[in-house]
Image: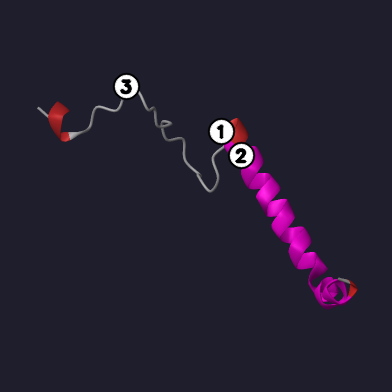
Amino acid sequence: MKELLKELLPMKWYFVYVAALLAWLAYANLYGDRILSFDNQEQWHSDGRSSHRSGIMHHK
């Protein structure tokens, strides 16, 4: 076990980075934050209701 830890020691910052990234993704998933979304799009709703009226069915 000690040999394995000695081999992984040079990669400790990689593991810290991965742990921080996973914590951020879990937080965003838990609280509904958007990741890599830079515009104010309407959020998707599973019940099908939407105020977006530019689809083919609403075209006149």
Which badge, 1 or 3, comes first in the chain's sequence? 1
The amino acid beneath tag 2 is: Ala
Q: In the current view of this chain or complex, which residue is farthest to the left?
A: 60
Image coordinates of residue 12 in percent, x first then y, are 82, 67
Q: Are marks 2 and 1 in contact (CB under 8 Å)?
A: yes
Image coordinates of residue 49 in percent, x first then y, are 32, 21
Q: Are marks 1 and 3 in contact (CB under 8 Å)?
A: no
Image coordinates of residue 14 in percent, x first then y, are 74, 66
Quadrant location of the N terminus in the rendered image: bottom right
Mark 3 lies on a secondary structure that is loop
Neighbours of disc 3 within 10 Å: few (<14), some (14-19), many (20+)? few
The residue closer to the viewer here, 13 or 53, is 13
Q: Quadrant of residue 59?
A: top left
The amino acid beneath tag 3 is: Arg
Q: Which numbered marker is on residue 49?
A: 3
The residue closer to the viewer here, 6 or 48, is 6
Residue at 24% across / 27% down in the picture?
Answer: 53
- Residue that badge 1 annotates: 32
- Residue that badge 2 annotates: 28
Instruction: Indicate whether residue 9 is drawn in magenta.
Output: yes
Magenta span covers which residues? 3-29
Q: In the current view of this chain or complex, which residue is farthest to the front?
A: 1
Residue at 20% across / 33% down in the picture?
Answer: 55
Instruction: Indicate whether residue 6 is drawn in magenta.
Output: yes
Mark 2 lies on a secondary structure that is helix
Neighbours of disc 2 within 10 Å: few (<14), some (14-19), many (20+)? few
